[in-house]
């Protein structure tokens, strides 16, 4: 474990929709957090030498056969443990208390009364609003524990062992609807667990620079860039560490946005002094993607071809030993790479789940422990211009996952034109920076329209815009109607082959941000 991660908080994931949010809330307090599967071994947990452990919520009931596997010996580790929702039920259940299903749950905002002003509830109001999401409840508390808060209907809302080394909340302090959630987390992290505030952008840059220097040494590293904030930060970080040994490459796979290749090269070379080179590999990618409709196959093909192209380029340019990529923590989570047996792969990321086994590079992924907002903070600390830092996320497979069905040059051109109009209007109307991610999608559906008193039978474009904190969950953006109207009119009037525009109002979950 690196010095930067010393004194970390481990989060055992029992399937909660809020687990990633717990991790982010801890990190927002400058303390490193790491998510581990619920069935993580005692040996692994001990080897991490955590300052504290958090047991997440989850959909199961502790008294059923389907309850997630959990090594109870972890409860004997001499570090503070916080149980949240299902985590509370686990602590009660394994300490001799009773958890039951009464058929009456609590969902949404609830009021609680705090009756002990110490430990985790220190400096909290006696009455507070919290976020509840549970069916089961505590009916008998364990011996040696105290109830420290009740909800308005007299349900146990929070409790603690006599020494306040084991604490549990029925509510979710990580959710923004819990008014004093951060006060509670601060009490746990610093007063009870004694964590240190060392997870900062400056410390991250310092440590990563040192690790990159040690790892790369006198060798060369090829860095794959796309113009997005992730790859831009990676390129700047590696360039800071090894200078001329950093060989940045932008592969134009034919699936970039309009004029994106040139804009990216100019901004990195002229604006940031990065040694970057552009390679047009579009014909190879189009050839391999011909006739491929299934999204997961597209991602794997694109991921594989990226490595094949990088291999060839590296051999032509001096045999780079390493490949640098902008893989993030959510990429690893969504690809199921750090999960237990019950995890589902949401999608393979081209730089995680689509890499061939026989590649000739050693991967270097300096950002693989970071969420997107943390990447942006690191970028600011590296003095990267704001327009690059605030750029919306763009998937590595590019428009290949925004063209539903067959990928052809004609369909790519249609989507490029529509997407350019969409993004430019968002910027002109001052909406762009209010949105986490916005893009157009080409749907494999033809619709009937009337243009110039003539019947048309053309393509359908869907517009997508979401707000989010980290991309793990997202809500559709409430776009002003006049802005939507302007976008739709401009696309229909200026993009050949499109006669209808729709707006996607699906949140994540149940949908994903991208359409594929």
Image (tube, grey):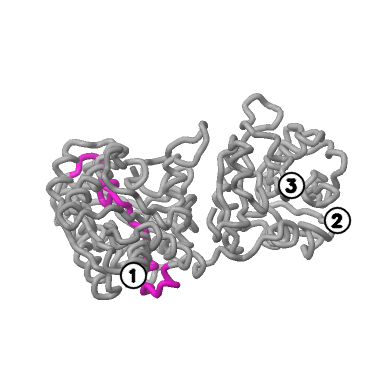
Q: Which residue position is annotated with label 2?
A: 115
Residue at 59% x, 48% y is: 48
Badge 1 density bin: few <14, some 14–19, many ≥20, Cα 10 Å:
few
In the image, taking residue 242 as reference, residue 182 lies left or right, namely right
What is the x, y in percent for residue 373? Answer: 47, 62
Res 118 → quadrant: bottom right
Where are the magenta residues, as a range?
A: 379-407
Compute the Cα span from label 1 to label 2. 50 Å
In the image, taking residue 277 as reference, residue 327 lies left or right, namely right
Residue at 72% x, 51% y is: 110
Residue 299 in view of the camera: yes
Tell me whether circle 1 and circle 2 mark residues in contact (CB < 8 Å): no
Badge 2 density bin: few <14, some 14–19, many ≥20, Cα 10 Å:
some
Compute the Cα span from label 3 to label 1. 53 Å
Q: Earlier in the sequence, mark 3 or mark 1?
A: 3
Residue 78 badge: 3
In the image, taking residue 33 as reference, residue 226 lies left or right, namely left
Residue 453 badge: none
Tell me whether circle 2 and circle 3 mark residues in contact (CB < 8 Å): no
Residue at 45% x, 41% y is: 337
In the figure, 394 relative to 381: above or below? above
What is the x, y in percent for residue 491? Answer: 23, 59
**Is residue 389 magenta-colored?**
yes
Residue 427 badge: 1
Q: Marks 2 and 3: which is nearer the front?
A: 3
Label total for image? 3
- Say which of 186 and 111 sits in front: 186
Q: Marks 3 and 1: which is nearer the front?
A: 3
Tell me whether circle 3 and circle 1 mark residues in contact (CB < 8 Å): no
Q: Residue furthest top?
A: 65
**Is residue 350 magenta-colored?**
no
């Amino acid at each position: 474990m690196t010095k930067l991660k010393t004194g970390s908080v481990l989060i055992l994931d029992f399937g909660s929709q809020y687990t990633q949010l717990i991790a982010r809330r801890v990190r927002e307090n400058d303390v490193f957090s790491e998510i581990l599967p619920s069935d993580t071994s005692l040996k692994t947990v001990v080897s991490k030498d955590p300052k504290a452990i958090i047991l997440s919520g989850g959909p199961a009931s502790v008294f059923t056969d389907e309850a997630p596997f959990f090594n109870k010996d972890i409860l004997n580790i001499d570090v503070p443990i916080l149980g949240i929702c299902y985590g509370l039920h686990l602590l009660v259940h394994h300490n001799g208390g009773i958890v039951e299903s009464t058929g009456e749950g609590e969902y949404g905002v609830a009021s609680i009364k705090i009756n002990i002003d110490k430990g985790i509830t220190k400096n909290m109001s006696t009455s507070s609003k919290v976020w509840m999401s549970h069916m089961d409840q505590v009916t008998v508390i364990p011996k040696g524990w105290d109830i420290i808060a009740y909800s308005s209907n007299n349900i146990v809302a929070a409790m603690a062992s006599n020494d306040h080394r084991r604490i549990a909340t029925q509510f979710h302090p990580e959710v923004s609807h819990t008014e004093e959630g951060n006060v509670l987390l601060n009490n746990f992290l610093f007063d009870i667990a004694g964590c240190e505030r060392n997870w900062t952008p400056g410390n991250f840059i310092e440590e990563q620079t040192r690790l990159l220097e040690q790892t790369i040494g006198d060798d060369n590293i090829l860095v794959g860039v796309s113009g997005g904030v992730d790859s831009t930060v990676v390129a700047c970080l590696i360039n800071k560490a090894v200078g001329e040994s950093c060989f940045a490459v932008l592969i134009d796979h034919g699936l970039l946005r309009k004029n994106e290749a040139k804009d990216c090269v100019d901004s990195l070379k002229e604006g940031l002094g990065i040694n970057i080179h552009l390679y047009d590999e579009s014909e190879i990618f189009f050839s391999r993607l011909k006739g491929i409709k299934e999204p997961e196959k597209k991602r794997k093909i694109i991921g594989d071809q990226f490595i094949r192209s990088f291999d060839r380029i590296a051999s032509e340019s001096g045999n780079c030993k390493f490949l640098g990529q902008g893989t993030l923590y959510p990429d690893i989570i969504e690809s199921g790479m750090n999960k237990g047996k019950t995890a589902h792969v949401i999608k393979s990321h081209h730089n995680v789940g689509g890499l061939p086994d026989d590649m000739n590079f050693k991967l270097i992924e300096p950002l693989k422990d970071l969420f997107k907002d943390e990447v942006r903070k690191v970028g600011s600390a590296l003095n990267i211009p704001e327009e690059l830092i605030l750029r919306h996320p763009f998937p590595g497979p590019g428009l290949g996952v925004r063209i539903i069905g067959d990928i052809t040059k004609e369909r790519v051109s249609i989507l490029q034109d529509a997407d350019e109009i969409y993004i430019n209007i968002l910027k002109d109307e001052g909406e762009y920076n209010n949105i986490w991610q916005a893009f157009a999608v080409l749907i494999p559906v033809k619709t009937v329209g009337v243009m110039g008193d003539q019947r048309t039978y053309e393509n359908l474009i869907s517009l997508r815009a979401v707000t989010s904190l980290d991309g793990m969950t997202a809500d559709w953006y409430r776009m002003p109607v006049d802005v939507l109207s302007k976008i739709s009119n401009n696309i229909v009037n200026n993009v050949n082959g499109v006669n209808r525009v729709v707006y996607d109002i699906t949140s994540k979950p149940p949908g994903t941000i991208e359409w594929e």
